[in-house]
Amino acid sequence: MKLLTGNDLVSGAVTWWTGNGWSIHVEDAADVGEHGEAILHAEEGARRVNAPYIIDALPTENGPRPAHIKDRIRALGPTVRTDLTLKPADPAAGDWII
Amino acid sequence: MYKYDNYDQAMVDARVAEFRDQINRRIAGEMTEDQFKPLRLMNGLYLQLHAYMLRVAIPYGTLDSRQMRMLAHIARKYDRDYGHFTTRQNIQYNWIKLEDCADILEELATVEMHAIQTSGNCIRNISSDQYAGAAADEVTDPRPWAELLRQWSTFHPEFSYLPRKFKIAVIASPEDRAAMRLHDIGLELVRKDGELGARVFVGGGMGRTPMIAPEINPFVKADDLLSYLEACLRVYNRYGRRDNMYKARIKILIHEIGADAYRGQVAEEFAHVKTLGIDPPLAELERISAFFAPPAYDAANVEPDRNDPDFALWLDQNVKPHKQAAYAIVNISLKPIGGIPGDATSAQIDVMADLAEKYSFDELRVTHAQNIVLPYVAKRDLYAVWQALRDAELADANLDLISDIIACPGLDYCSLANARSIPVAQKIATRFADMDRQRDLGELKLKISGCINACGHHHAGHIGILGVDKKGVENYQLTFGGSGAEDVSIGKIIGPGFDEDGVVDAVEKATEVYKALREGDERFVDTYRRVGLEPFKEAIYG
């Protein structure tokens, strides 16, 4: 599957295209299939996302998992500061990255 | 310390106002990211893996307690309560919001700080010896010259769009504590027949093509130094490649045309530049130098009581001799075992500011090894300083030992990185946590980069580690034999790479080989240079 990701223009936060908007949670990300480029240009032009790009991901029972470790770290947060990740209370969350 | 005059302050204030307007226009949609990106980079604002990252300049790594407290304030108010001190003697904040950036820069400007020259293809923030003004072995204080270069280089109209970024280091001691010859220009201030001048090295650097700067001129008189540097930059600006960013650094130009040809072109250009009168008059040099006058040393020479064994350990490892017998140079390690190299919380930054104000004539330094220095501490105050550092978890006695690791932010933060650096540093430091073991190994400079750009200086590590992406999996190459000091050398890759745990094991095996083969006071790097790679390779790869 293909995901569309980027950063929020103002906050800089990592965001994921959900099909009808943007979420900071990769679990909400939608498969953009062949439509990624079109969505990317429309959303970037409307300043709803900054520096967007399309990535490969695998569907899992807990939602999409980006194929590359860099995007998994983007999705969750730094592996060395679990307190600053999106799941600070889940000590096993880091296993999802590696 | 240097204090801004009206011109300095007006320039920085104007830049903040200009950038505020640019940010507003970007948020309002009047600029695209392609248009905005070079403008934000000129103000130190990057877009990194998780958010915007702001890199704040600390010219030649020198700051006072007021500035240090401001860095803590920025971390507390606008970021996530910590900052990351870098190998360029700067500080980075990892979680900045675009809408806050102008306010941050405005607050920084109130204490004579900014983020100019921390990005872009300009002359970057000047770096120097963290012991400047305090080192017993310096021929002069390099800071007035670093400040002169700062003023010369900031907004230099000819050198704001160079082929590539340009880094200059200034030292004034035979012992190189600033990796001087791994800069685009390295200056070593020296005296010749009593006259002050500089050895000029040009074309060093790390990155994907590491090179040691050759000596281009063995002695440029201090009175000619700015003109000579202007000539060095002009030749680069004219002939440096702009068609390929990987071949655009001055080291590539000098490597391709040869040091002799470059030297000749600089001499020719210098003959012209010298007629332009850009070298400052004596009065201006004296004005700048006055800001760096020695502090009012007044302490009696009182040797510290070594009864507390932990304090004695710290004294032996982290405290260095001062040019004044009654004083000492204190190194504050930002490398706690299992911690993140270079990170400090806002509370810790405040503690260091307080200690500088109370015990170090209000001055601190940031080192390229990502530590902090209090340059002027009376020996009678060392125990009190150590107690305060210990209470703030800043008293690790590991300076220059294997756990004093330089590590770039790596893939945990950096969008350019291919692999994580910090977890490797944490695992190695934890493996060698025992202080007796570390001290037995002696000076061992271990440096880790998460990509070939080498922000973690792996090429200059006695042991270097380079993280690479091997088909989507993190992999780590080991290099041995590098040094950024006066025995400068580039490390060599020892063989196939390892996974994260494998590289930690390999480092441990290398230390065992060293212990078995070392002679006398040899450091790890000395033994490696004497015996060569083979015994290490055999132990590591079998």
Image: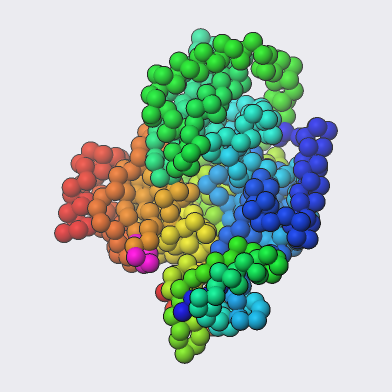
Instruction: Assign the N terminus of chain B to one quadrant of the image.
Output: top right
Q: Point out residue B47 in the picture as x, y percentages from the top left corner.
A: 61, 58
Residue B442 appears left or right of B350:
left
Please check the rendered image and state whether residue B504 is part of the magenta-colored stretch, yes or no.
no
Residue B257 in the image: above or below residue B87: above
Q: Point out residue B278 in the picture as x, y percentages from the top left corner.
A: 67, 18
Image quadrant in which you'd find residue B52: bottom right
Instruction: Assign the C terminus of chain B to one quadrant of the image.
Output: bottom left
Q: Point out residue B66 in the picture as x, y percentages from the top left corner.
A: 75, 47
**Which residue sits at x=71%, y=60%?**
B98
Residue B177 in the image: above or below residue B514: above
**Which residue sits at x=50%, y=47%?**
B369
Q: Nearer the viewer, residue B138 or B128?
A: B128
User: How many numbered callouts?
Assistant: 0
Tell me if residue B80 can be seen: no
**Which residue sits at x=38%, y=61%?**
B469
Q: Nearer the viewer, residue B334 or B163?
A: B163
Q: Nearer the viewer, residue B131 or A50?
A: A50
Image quadrant in which you'd find residue B391: bottom right
Image quadrant in which you'd find residue A37: bottom right
Q: Main secondary structure of the magenta part?
A: strand
- Residue farthest toward the bottom in the current orientation of the protein: A61
Q: Point out residue B493 in the picture as x, y percentages from the top left corner.
A: 29, 48
Q: In the rendered structure, which segment of residues is drawn in magenta?
A: B471-475
**Which residue sits at x=52%, y=69%?**
A54
Tell me if residue B464 can be seen: yes
Residue B165 appears left or right of B102:
left
